[in-house]
Image (cartoon, coloured by chain):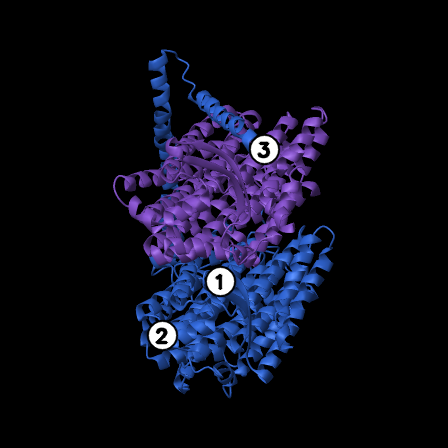
Amino acid sequence: MMENVLNMLPTWLAFSPLLGAMLLLLVPQKRTGWLKRLGILATFPPLVLALLLYGTFHSGMDSVQFEHRLQWFEIPLSGGASWELTYHMGVDGLSMPLVVMATVVATLAAFASTYIQKRQKEYFLFFLILEMGMLGVFLAQNLFLFFLFFEITLVSLYFLIGIWGFVHRERAANQFLLYNGLGSAFLLISLVGLLVLFGTLDFNQLQELSDHPRTKGVLSQSPLKEIVWGIFLSMVVAFGIKLPIFPFHRWMLKVHTEAPPAVVMVHSGVLLKMGAYGLIRFGVQLFPDQMRTIATTLAVLGLVNILYGAVLAFVQQDLKRVLAYASISHMGIILFGVASANVSGLTGAVFQAVSHGLISAVLFFFIASLVDRAGTTEIGKLGGMARSAPVLTGVFLAGGLALLGLPGMSGFVSEFLVFVGLFQQEPALAAVGILGLVLTAAYTLRAVLATGFGPLKSRLSDITDIKPSEAAPMLMLLAFILLIGVYPDVLGEPIKATMQMIASRIGG
Amino acid sequence: MIENIWAIPLFPLIAFVLLLAGRNVFQAKTATWVGSLSAFLSFLGSVAALWVQLSEGNHLSLFPWLSFGETTIRFGIELNQLNVLMMILVSLISFLVQVYSHSYMKGDQRVPIFHAYLSLFTFSMLGLVLSPNLLQLYIFWELVGVCSFLLIGYWYFKPEAKRAAQKAFIVTRIGDVGLLIAVILTLLYVGNLELTTIFASLDAGEIPPGMVTLIALLVFVGAVGKSGQFPLHTWLPDAMEGPTPVSALIHAATMVAAGVFLVARMFPLFQSSSVAMDTVAWTGAFTAIFAAGIGLVQYDIKRVLAYSTISQLGYMMFALGAGGYVAGIFHLMTHGVFKALLFLVAGAIIIVFNHEQDLRRMGGLWKTHPTLGWFFVIGCLSIAGIPPFSGFFSKEEVLLAAFADGRMGIFILGIVTAFLTAFYMFRLFFLAFWGKSSIETRGKTVASTMIWPMGVLALLSILAGFVEVPGHHLSFWLREGSDTISGKVGEASIWVAFFSIAVSLAGIILAWAVYANKSIPRDLLQKPFPWLYSFLHRKCYVDEMQRAIVVEPYRMLGFLLSAFDRYIVQGIVHLVAGIPRFAGAIVTRLQNGQAQTYALVSVIGLVLLIIGLTAGRLFG
């Protein structure tokens, strides 16, 4: 009985944000205080369920746990055969940490959403639908279901950017949709391809079928071989746009600068990680041979991301853009991890996904309070804030140190693991890439010091420091960052078995 | 007792958390108490640990920290001779510095934060020296870096402090990346990062020789950054922007000591590669004379001391590079004591002169503040290597190590540096204490909480040398139980001792003649070699070169790429986005090319369609 209830956990978890959303519908538009409070509260059921998931997760298991599977519908084909689509949820060592991270970030982003000034009701509705979408993405065990959740995140994010963003919000939303629509199209193409080839989109079945020696033999011949490659590459492009891989990054700059900071917390923290998740889940796990073939290319792309992002972050005049380019640079680390195709690299990629999620969240929470107070994020207009807002500056300093990979914080563990992985495969690329650590320190300190240090700008002299109610969520995020940094086995142990299994598929 | 060693670094960590949390509650006095008490408890613990080490021997305990695949990285605590010696040095000096800061920082707005940072610094350094695992060491290594960053930039509102803090972090991080690569390569070749395992596999010859050299050199790159060796020394003089107690801590016991400690800790690695040993020795020797040369012509009291630190660190490095394991550590220890003394006195001098740091405006302090004078002269005699002050004995070991090693070039550089050291230190002494000053110093008292830490350090500066001489107790103890650390025991060539004393005395007399007696004109160097003078005065243009070669091109690259990103990459996007618009315009002959609207409508439509088609089946 208990077992059955627990197996429903992924389903409950994915749809639990809707509970609050329903209640939200009952609150009148004008009661903004209630809307905000309820909006925050609505993110707690998923958080609690995710922590329950972490607590009951079987660490030693490398396969999917908490499986929940239902027949959904069939598409009959001629000759009595049919395509079967199932509702299939579950979680393993790769998705569990992302789910937990997503719920943490969502809850704290809900706190940061209290800075939202208009139409709070719709805002929180879209926000909660977005949360449902992203949890579903990580929990779906069927590619069709995955795709549905993926699209839900696109739509809800489109509205969140387009309605509640800064001045150029509409252009940003449109550009976001254009790129991601393109990505979805690629994803859809590969989905259809897989369905035609294998007759199923259930992840387990796909994996078993593709592992089968006979299918392997069939698929290794022309023209099926080329078709498989086509499917694989269109997946890589789809998730590459999401991550984003250079040169597909322009849209996310716009999102970082134009979306409300609370939404960027989720976007940069969680949604970009769907790209990382997709690359590992569907790239490495489903197409290990193809992935191995393009590993060097991926590593080169990772290097480009790291250096390109870091150099550009150094010369930006707006904090939001600094952080946007920093995200590009940090996603390069994930590419490095995936490209190294061994257990330490892949483990590092997951660590980086989780860690960057938390770090982005804390930094954009800071941006949210900064915008609320100073009304600007331009570096030239900031300075000396350590005097008027020491706690706020301290949070930025701590977040910045986490961003530059200070040991004792989560970012260091992921960078270490990734470079251990990559040095085994591509020592030359790794040796150049590791210089990124110096560049990261350069742009991070420049931003932190320009904001908090130096003489206090007169227009900032009367801004107030953050209230405890604002500081608490930020400190919460920092506590998670420190926890992973100080004792990484808290994350390493549960994901170990799965990562070993995935790495062994690709031969690392 | 031996199981509780982990508690020693914990005291300052607790103090850090307490002070940070109660920064608005604590008064300055309470904050000093909390900080000093925690350091003092660490000091007591370290002394107890020494006793335990002497009676029960070394100790090691580990726990799993991170596991991935087949690898498990274990962290823990290791107690051995070198570690316990460092613990005592670190905790003692940080205790004295915290007490001293009480008066020095009087009136500052954020005293609790200051002590919080100092405590975190102490914690990080203690954690570093106790590490049995190279990765753990690296973690604390970076924490030490970040603490010095925070303290150098403590007066955050000063633009110079801000720049100096940033520079300190980034320049040392260049070195850190070298160390990190070394850590990673070690893991790949040894399969483990515990130092005992690394040394065992070095012994067994499991690492290819070329790789040993590469790893050792990369470790040394890390040490070069932290210990201010050429060419990564540029952050250290700028770090003088921090409050003077911080300089004392950074220069004596924490930050810069870490690099020398690292080389000593990894000594078996270096010994396995003659290339690495040569590199260490020559880098150290060059840094020693180079920094001493610059120190000759600087006029900021703290900068002179900063260059003297760089130079003395060079001594330690070349001692280690010459195989003088004990000599390097011995000099690290005595230097820690007398350099802390010199900085604390310098801090008092600066206060007496109303925060004036320019030596040209100082003078006459011997008459008004003889106590400071005596303390300072003890420090100067120590660093100049005059017996029986501690610096004499350790410098002697260093020179003997170089001599015994047979690298005559290094030995000669060491001797010349000894002469320069004696000269510039006494130049500093005579400029500050002889002659006259335009600034009124009479009646300015130095608080007793500043005096007695200096007193303790002065006493130790006199006594510290006797742990080794006579009887070589330190040598025997440090080498006990380790056959990996061979090194050469310097044959006490008596002429080396006489020669170095003579050279140092010559330096002192010359300084006296120029700056006190004034029988030799001051432009002794400036007149015959004006180019050399300005070259040294501008710190050999290393800063300028680094700016021109690294910083500015990097900034340029940033702006170029920025333009590339904005116009080229974005342009391609517009082009791609324009294709459907263009196609749409042709097909429909309408100018309504809203590709985005279509995209949104189709995405939403698709989602709704699928849900509508399928949801019924799921629940039905």
The residue lying toward the viewer, choosing from B610 and B296, is B610
Front-most of B187 and A469? B187
Of the 4 image quadrants, the one containing the C terminus of chain A is bottom left
Q: Which residue occupies 58% across, 47% down?
A: A100
Indicate the amino acid at tag 2: Ser
The reply to whether dot 2 and dot 3 touch (C-beta < 8 Å) is no
**Alpha carbon of mark 3 to alpha carbon of mark 1: how far?**
56 Å
Camera-side residue of A374 and B197 = B197
Q: Looking at numbered disc 3 in the image, what kind of residue is underneath it? A: Phe
Tag 1 residue: B138
The colour one sees for chain A in the rendered image is purple
Q: Mark 2, residues whose alpha carbon is within 10 Å: few (<14), some, or many (≥20)? A: some
Which residue is at the far front? Answer: A80
Chain B shade in the render: blue
Q: Which residue lies furthest to the top in this view?
A: B589
Q: Where is residue B141 in the image (x, y as percent from the top left)?
A: 50, 62
Q: Which comes sooner in the sequence, label 2 or label 1?
A: 1
Q: Residue at x 47, y 24 (%)?
A: B600
- Which mark is on residue B619? 3
What residue type is disc 1 on? Answer: Tyr
Q: Which residue is pictured at 74% across the width and 55% down the height?
A: B27
User: Of circles 2 and 3, which is in front?
Assistant: 3
Query: Where does label 2 land, which residue?
Result: B272
* Chain containing mark 3: B
Left or right of B145: which side holds B485? left
